Image: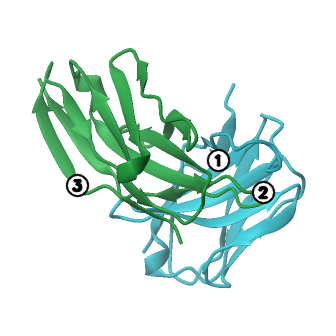
Chain colours: A green, B cyan
Amino acid sequence: AQKVTQAQTEISVVEKEDVTLDCVYETRDTTYYLFWYKQPPSGELVFLIRRNSFDEQNEISGRYSWNFQKSTSSFNFTITASQVVDSAVYFCALSPSNFGNEKLTFGTGTRLTIIP
Amino acid sequence: DTAVSQTPKYLVTQMGNDKSIKCEQNLGHDTMYWYKQDSKKFLKIMFSYNNKELIINETVPNRFSPKSPDKAHLNLHINSLELGDSAVYFCASSQDRQLPNTEAFFGQGTRLTVV
């Protein structure tokens, strides 16, 4: 069974502050993929990142960075110098990588509000 | 070009009606999905199709029946709609399931409101 926990239901920060969104997962699979998706107020789901369980290197993309720690089963997402456009619901998700079972298990999401 | 498109975007209907949501992807993907997002934003997979074949069928009432006329389309038909069916339904697609897992591309969602 897979489970993704995003303990932070809502976060509000003032613009230009850094903010970290937590994600903790549970899986019995030895190989898996982790994802982050953004859902802006317009409603669509936007893919942000996919991380293979073999690759524990942290990743940085502009103001976004991700910290994957297998030892703590966490895949946290940090936005530096936050902007109002970052306001959205962010979902962490997990998918097993074995054949024939591509499905995403989502966390409950974290609503991020950036205050101008 | 819209990669995954769903129609309609909004659907308001009365209890007991039958309705369909259409989904089309132009990415050449072999696998398509339906997800349901409830009022608390919780996203859960409903169905997964690969090359028109049903792969995943989570615990979903029989009133929900996916139909895949070809691998670019996965429509969702719902019979005898109930108030609890009100949600946002997302269609998604991803590459061949036998290749290393890739991200799923999502449609814009269909907000279904049952009154």
Q: Give the mark nearer the N terminus: 3 vs 2.
A: 3
Is any atom of residue A44 visible in this view? Answer: no
| Residue A46 at x, y percent in the picture | 49, 36
Residue at the top extreme, as displayed: A62
Question: How far apart are labels 2 and 1 at the CA level?
Answer: 27 Å
Chain ID for label 1?
B
Q: Left or right: B2 with respect to B37?
A: right
Question: How far apart are labels 1 and 3 at the CA level?
Answer: 28 Å
> Is B3 drawn above or below residue B41 in the view shown?
above
Question: How far apart are labels 3 and 2 at the CA level?
Answer: 33 Å
- Which residue carries the number 1 mark? B6
- Between B27 and B95, the one nearer to me in the picture: B95
Q: Quadrant of residue B2?
A: top right
Q: Residues within 10 Å of mark 2 (few under 14, many from 20)?
A: few
Amino acid type of disc 1? Gln
> Do dots 2 and 1 share one subunit?
no
Q: Left or right: A84 with respect to A90?
A: left
- Which residue carries the number 3 mark? A9
Q: Left or right: A113 with respect to B65?
A: left
Amino acid type of disc 2? Phe
Q: Are marks 1 and 3 in contact (CB under 8 Å)?
A: no
Where the C terminus of chain A falls, by quadrant?
top left
Chain ID for label 2?
A
Q: Nearer the viewer, mark 2 or mark 1?
A: 2
> Do dots 1 and 3 share one subunit?
no
